[in-house]
Amino acid sequence: MNITVFLADDHAIVRNGLQLILQAETDITVVGEASDGHEAVRAVTKVCPDIVIMDIAMPGLNGIEATRKIHATCPSVKVLILSIHATAEHIFRSLQAGAQGYLLKESAGSEVIRAVRTLHIGRRYLSEKISETVINDYLRQRDLETAKSPLESLSEREREILQLTAEGKTSAEMAHILFISPKTVETYRSRMMHKLGIEDLSSLIKFAIQYGLTSLE
């Protein structure tokens, strides 16, 4: 049975490398690619591949939020997160968003085929360098109210505006991207900062980087 795969990463060299690895397999076909989260969601909704290999740090809409949207609209599509981040916070948020696998970029070359095949048969896949024990312990801790991430208090729209703010977008630019008014953008941002207890944009950007909504690149 042919396995269809979609690639979402903002670096063309990563997409090209993955495509070479994947299409060397006779039963795997790359059916599309995207360089940002919004583009990935739109394309995946149309193509409905078996597997999406998704980077976390992407412009416009990060991979975790893109995964959440894909999981909501195309639940049959399985998402494999591909990231440089090995922290429990990133891994938990990815799994919570609906990802079925998490692969570290440093080991993608040797593991990506195995990860794709594992997801295709309905099983989860965690990179070999990620300790199962650490993940299981962390997931149990997250059931406690005191262990919740500050991001969980934000709505989906507030998280989108948080990322776009950290990327330096103006209220007018965000309004255009999200199809809302600049005044609505400012209302969401004010509400979001109040929830997080953050009083200035500099601290807000640091928060977004810390929680993987954007990167320093």
Image (spheres, grey):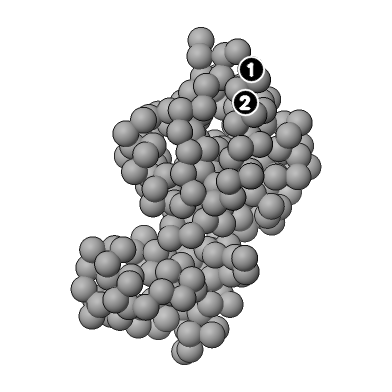
Q: Can residue 78 be seen in this view?
A: no
Residue visible at 66% across and 41% down in the picture: 103
Instruction: Name the amino acid type tagged 2.
Output: Leu
Residue furthest to the top: 1
Q: Where is residue 56 in the image (x, y as percent from the top left)?
A: 56, 52
Q: Mark 1 points at which residue?
A: 25
* Residue 84 left/right relative to 60: right
Q: Can residue 202 be seen in this view?
A: yes
Q: Position of residue 194 (x, y in %)?
A: 40, 83
The dot on residue 187 is none
Tag 2 near tag 1, CB within 8 Å: yes
Looking at the rendered structure, the secondary structure element under dot 1 is loop
Decide which of 87, 10 is in the foreground and name it: 10
Residue visible at 27% across and 70% down in the picture: 175
Looking at the rendered structure, the secondary structure element under dot 2 is helix
Q: Mark 2 points at which residue?
A: 22
Residue visible at 37% across and 29% down in the picture: 48
